[in-house]
Amino acid sequence: MNQLSTGSAASGGSNKGTSAVGRRTFLRFAGLSSISALTLTTLACEDHKPIVYDPNFIDLGFGDVGIMNLSYAQEQLEVAFYSTVIESPAFNQLSAEEKALFVDLRDRERTHLELFRYLLGDKAIPMLTPNFDNIKIGSREEILKTGHTFEDLGVAALNGAGRFVTDMELLNLSGKIVSVEARHAALLRDLLHPRSNMPGSFAGDDIITPDTGLDRALYPQQVVVLAQPYIKERITAERIPVQ
Amino acid sequence: MNIFQIFSDIEKIDGDATERLSFYSRRYFLRKGTKAATAAALPLALASVTQEAFAQSTEVQEVLNFALTLEYLEDEFYKKALSSSLSFGGDRSVFEQISKHEDAHVKLLKSALGSAAVAKPSMFKFEEVFPGVFSDYQTFLIVSQAFEDTGVRAYKGQAPKLYKQAVLTTALQIHAVEARHAAEVRRIREGRVWITKNEPDGAPAAVYAGEENVVQKVDVTKLGPGFSDIVVSEAFDEPLTKEQVLAIVSPLIVM
């Protein structure tokens, strides 16, 4: 099974070694007290746990847990994307500076991924299997374009989910992450379009509504529809309330 | 008059006439808003922010007026720069794009607040506080980066006050655009888009105070190999309180 790689040795989710299990158990235990604050309201509900109906169908969960799992799924996708790109033949088309930036992008997304994994504890969805059959990473241009598409989607997802978050700490955390995703989107767009050709592409009219100056915001369910083509398992955000 | 005055003024107005003001404003705005929406086919987000802003508490109006004040500052900064003799190298269009967004943010927030909107400050002291800002491109870039990163941190600090409201979405949508701007200015300056720890990077130290934080409920540096304090501090942008932001921008503003 080709699970999403978190890059280098950090892939605790697929590491079956005894010490790794010990570490994971500890993290899970340590995470229990912290997660309780995050999910105080949802714990009261019987159905707060992600329900795996079958191996190819994953429920992100109820309320804040669902929103966190959606972010966790996107971080998994981003880390898998950067890891795949870094090992792809076309990576050599990038300049030395661009290569270094891609490693930086992967490493920063990895911290998001590991934090969500830690905070979710036993409510985390499993590691997903990427389906990158549909993405194009055969050239420098395709790599940059696909990258900013993922990052733009990450921004829109966190923008859209914010008002449905009930836990204040999760709201704060999402805010700390979304602006970094926006920085990443701007970076990849800036690399893709030389400033002399398309100087406003970092925040282009294709993504920022010109007359309001607003970035996109998407409902969790819309995000799932857009992310689904890149994930082998079917995921659902049905139980994330949107009012 | 200093910037703190704006907020107490609004409180006074609201304290005396909240009901009358909000009722009148809401009706006025809805009437006007409907027309505008039909004419310009504005997105739904605008309708929701405007309607909700006036169904809302003084606290939300305060947040929006605080945001509007920062947007006035940024808007004026880029307009002044673009109409000055400053040489932007090949990057003039970058700042035209940024300026377009700041102008749109001012208009959006003003229309959301209607009659409750704070007035634009009478004067901005860019050149007094940052000598050479409109003649030396590197100085201009530092100030631009400082304004954009301060904007990102300011919106982030206000988000909890808009908890569960539609207007939170709008604030987050602006917040992300400020982050894109900050990233682009950083690209032009030094190629990298992240805030590294609390390094002032040429800007006043207060702009990046607290950015060195690596604890997000847990020390994130402990969660994986290679999660250095530099990597983790860059991966999470930190908020500023309203008071911290006002301490940064007040010297620039004459009401």
Image: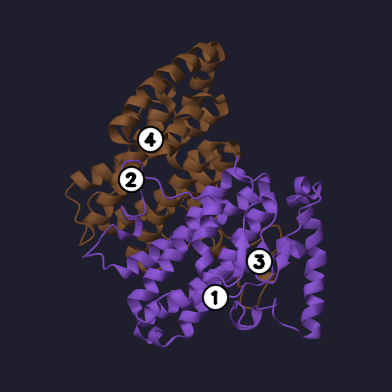
Chain colours: A purple, B brown
Residue with the most extreme front position:
A54
Q: Residue at x 42, y 62 (%)?
A: A185
* Residue wearing tag 3: A57
**Drawn side of residue B136 relative to residue B155, left or right:** left
Estimate the spatial distance between the alpha carbons at disc 2 and disc 3, rounded to whole Å.
41 Å
Of tags 1 and 2, the one toward the viewer is 1
Residue A54, horizontal then vertical, whole percent:
71, 69
Considering the numbered disc 3 on the image, is that residue within a helix, a strand or a loop?
A: strand
Look at the numbered disc 1 and give the secondary structure of its residue: helix
Disc ID at residue B74:
none
Q: Position of residue B201 (x, y in %)?
A: 43, 61
Please tell me which residue is depicted at 45% across the width and 29% down the height of the picture. Answer: B50
Q: Which residue is mark 1?
A: A80
Q: Quadrant of the N terminus of chain B?
A: top left
Residue type, mark 2 in image: His
Element at label 2: helix
Discs 2 and 3 carry the same chain letter? no
Q: CA distance from mark 1 to mark 3?
A: 20 Å
Q: Is residue B136 visible?
A: no
Instruction: Say which residue label 2 marks.
Output: B101
Q: Nearer the viewer, mark 3 or mark 4?
A: 3
